[in-house]
Image: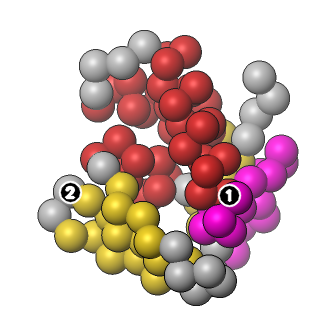
């Protein structure tokens, strides 16, 4: 699997409520409620951390194998990218 780097779009509204993240796309008003695992991915989406490293963090916090965590994370990222909520790159983003 080629490495992916993810970052948050600026065209969103997001709020953490308890252990869940609420996200709405300003582009198409799509609304997502993220569970604890998806929230870990969202919070780590800095554009510089490889998705495989984020999946490893999921393995440490939850009882899941690396392959499953990577597969599920990639599927989740692809879904949010289709809505313009996450941006995906094959190279790290430069620091802000």
Label 1 vs label 2: CA separation?
Answer: 22 Å
Give me the residue at 42% from left, 64% from top.
Answer: 32
Image x and y of residue 66, in percent: 49, 17
| Residue in view at x 77 percent, y 60 percent | 93
Q: On the picture, is 60 further left or further right than 26?
A: left
Which callout, 1 or 2, points to the residue nearer the camera? Answer: 1
In what quadrant of the picture does the C terminus appear?
bottom right
Q: Residue at x 53, y 81 (%)?
A: 29
Is residue 32 in view from this perspective? yes
Q: Quadrant of residue 94?
A: bottom right
User: Colour scheme used in the picture?
Assistant: secondary structure
Indicate whether 88 appears above or below 84: above
Tally the marks: 2
**Does residue 53 appear anywhere in the picture?**
no
Q: Is residue 3 left or right of residue 34?
A: right
Outermost residue on the left side: it is 18
- Residue 63 appears at what percent x and percent y? 28, 19
Residue 19 shows which numbered tag?
Answer: 2
Picture quadrant where residue 47 is located:
bottom right
Kindly identify which residue carries mark 1: 81
Disc 1 element:
helix
Q: Is residue 67 above or below residue 20?
A: above
Q: Residues within 10 Å of mark 2 (few under 14, many from 20)?
A: few
Asked if the residue at tag 2 contacts the one at tag 1, i.e. Cβ–Cβ closer than 8 Å, the answer is no
- Considering the image in quadrants, where does the N terminus appear? top right
Q: Is residue 86 magenta?
A: yes
Left or right, residue 95 beside residue 13: right
Q: Which residues are magenta?
A: 82-96
For marks 1 and 2, the one nearer the N-term is: 2
Task: Decide: is 60 above or below 14.
Answer: above
Q: Secondary structure at mark 2?
A: loop
In front: 28, or 10? 28
């Amino acid at each position: 699997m080629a490495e992916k780097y993810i970052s948050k779009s600026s065209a969103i509204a997001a709020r953490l409520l308890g252990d869940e993240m609420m996200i709405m796309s300003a582009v198409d008003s799509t609304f997502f409620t993220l569970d604890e695992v998806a929230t870990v991915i969202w919070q780590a989406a800095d554009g510089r951390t490889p998705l495989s490293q984020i999946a490893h963090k999921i393995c440490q916090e939850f009882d899941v194998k690396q392959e499953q965590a990577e597969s599920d994370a990639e599927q989740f990222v692809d879904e949010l990218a289709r809505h313009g909520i996450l941006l995906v790159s094959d190279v790290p983003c430069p620091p802000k």
